[in-house]
Amino acid sequence: MIDSHCHLNFIKDKLTVAELVEEATAAGVHTIINPGTSLATSIESLELARRFESVYALVGVHPHDASEVDDAVVARLKELASEKKVVGIGEIGLDFYRDLSPRPVQRRVFERLMGLAVELKMPVVIHTREAFEDTLEIVQDFAGDLRGGVFHCFPGDIDQAWTVFDLGFSISVGGMITFNKSKMADLAREAPLDKMFLETDAPYLAPVPHRGKTNRPAYVTHVCSHLAQLKGITPAEVEKITDRNCQKLFGLVDMFGE
């Protein structure tokens, strides 16, 4: 099983990072994708990927930190992206809910980092909150030249999801699908499994039965099981298909079997 979006370096828990990875492995999680949210955390992400065989890194700048981006930051991200265990650019995007960076700055940085992904022929991992239409407008400008990407913790409905799918992108779902009256659960029930990834977004948004506690990569198993219930299929089938989706996007395998 793959946790396609986990911030190991943000988890402040009783377990060390090594213990969190060990726990995840014991639970059947063989791959963890760890995104960067700033230059500093992108460097941390790469260091974790070098340290643990099951961890792969993304490098990027979250919209909250867009104001820190200048030519030197972009150049350093490009350098980091050349490392073998860096598999994409992310997380990048727009966040108009908190507005921690000015919106024009967010847009400019998002466009620049999308351009970097095109230049490097790498997929993107997109964050969007209260900014779907603005995010989509920018994605549409780059989609034809991109290797693909995923909208993580997808916030939209099924119609918005199909707009994303039609551009060649996928979506990821996490612990919120286990919550009562969850809109993400409604979306997950309807969306095609071959367009979906599993994620935790740890340490945030822990699934039931751990809701309200620190999320951990091992808990992606609960997301998998609940998605299987929503789909009326087995967890093994969910795991097989979502793993392949993620492996294909990030180039984690060279060839696929049947």
Image (spheres, rainbow, N blue to C red):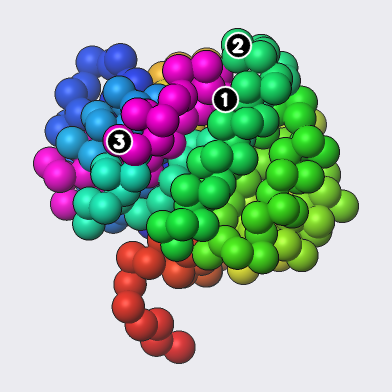
Q: Secondary structure at mark 2?
A: loop
Question: Going by the picture, which residue comes out furthest to the bottom?
Answer: 258
Q: Is residue 129 left or right of residue 47?
A: right
Where is residue 144? Give x, y as percent. Answer: 66, 65
Q: Of the two numbered discs 1 and 3 on the same chain, state the one appearing first in sequence.
A: 1
Q: Quadrant of the N terminus?
A: bottom left
- Mark 1 lies on a secondary structure that is helix
Q: Quickly name the residue at label 1.
A: 63
Label 2 is placed on what type of residue?
Leu
Magenta span contains residue 71: yes
User: Which of pointers 1 and 3 indicates the residue nearer the eye?
Assistant: 3
Residue extent of the magenta highlight: 48-76
The residue labelled by disc 3 is: 76
Q: Are marks 1 and 2 in contact (CB under 8 Å)?
A: yes
The residue positioned 66% from the left and 14% from the top of the image is: 102
Quadrant in the picture for the C terminus: bottom left
Q: CA distance from mark 2 to mark 3?
A: 23 Å
Q: Earlier in the sequence, mark 2 or mark 3?
A: 3
Residue that mark 2 sits on: 100
